Image (cartoon, rainbow, N blue to C red):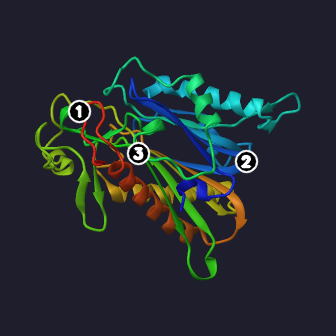
Amino acid sequence: MKGLTDIPGILVGHASDYDGLTGCTAILCEAGAVGGGDIRGSATGTQEWDLLHPQHLTERIHGVVFSGGSAFGLEAASGVRRFLEHSGIGYETGAAKVPLVPAAILYDLGIGKATARPTRESGEAAAAAATNRAVVEGAVGAGTGATVGKLLGMRQAMKSGIGSWTVELEGKYKGVLVAALAAVNAVGDVRDPATNKIVAGARTAPNSMDFADSARIMKGGTPSGFSRTNTSLVVVATNALLTKVQATKLAQFASLGVARAIHPVNTMSDGDVTVALSIGRETAPIDSLGIAAAEAVVESILRAVRLAPTLGGVPGLKA
């Protein structure tokens, strides 16, 4: 399995700044994809999000951009639009083709250089690098500066990044795929639902690898000096044909995977969002697709932390 690019018609490319520790990721669907969205966090930074609303005029979008750099990183989406325009891709208005590209950002200014932000050129580079090969995971693209477990500050946090995974339905729906990509930058800890054990998160001390358990700490009150600067970004895609209403429901199902793997999640300090893309002609019940979407998201989140190396003085699990 290749991750998100297992879905025919989906391309993924990254642009990474390892000096400033930031970057962006372009998910292209050049032939167009039916999109839906779900916002669960309370500190979001988005652009063109209304394109995903079932009542919006347009039926299809042409890409999704995830970026670091906080609100500054939204600039990367203009580079993806420029790349798609030069490729002759977009919504036909009569006078010109306009690429439709929702975008969302995460906050990574607390690691690396706070003055380093993804730019229009970064977005264009990520789009130009987009391919249908296996998704590159770890500290790349929008996950370059991603971290988790920040309740006790960056000195006790852990490195994260991007993960991607695919789940195939079974029985008579064999061949129907749901794939996910997650850029994990949560204030909370990442837990493996199979064991309920913390995999990566806030540590008891800067020189320790023992976990403090952020959810337990928060039940006693959020520590003073805590920074509200986080956010996890998820996209799921399927080769099943969906309406915009169904795609929105698929995004909601996928958000359940985020809740299973991150504790605490969707806080006032997270801008968690999920995008769903339908590109294909297969058929399957939306509930079945939703189960697969949540599973794909859980595994993507686990891979995001397990494949992240130590960077910027923040320890990662990858040797």
Q: Which residue is drawn at 56% across and 67% down?
A: 289
User: As displayed, is residue 115 above or below residue 91?
Assistant: above
Residue 295 is left or right of residue 302, and the answer is right
Label 3's element? loop
User: As displayed, is residue 295 above or below residue 122?
Assistant: below
Residue on which disc 1 sits: 154
Badge 3 local density, few (<14 within 10 Å), some, or many (20+)? many
Q: Residue at x 24, y 32 (%)?
A: 313
Rendering coords of residue 53 (x, y %):
63, 46
Amino acid beneath label 1: Met
Of marks 3 and 1, which one's residue comes earlier in the chain?
3
Of marks 2 and 1, which one's residue comes earlier in the chain?
2
- Comparing 7 with 63, the one in front is 7
Badge 2 local density, few (<14 within 10 Å), some, or many (20+)? many
Rendering coords of residue 106 (x, y %):
42, 34
Q: Which of marks 3 and 1 is in front?
A: 3
Residue 86 is left or right of residue 112, and the answer is right
Rendering coords of residue 251 (x, y %):
53, 54
Q: Give the residue furthest to the bottom.
A: 171
- Comparing 204 with 47, the one in front is 204
Q: Give the residue furthest to the right.
A: 94
Residue on which disc 2 sits: 32
Residue on which disc 3 sits: 138
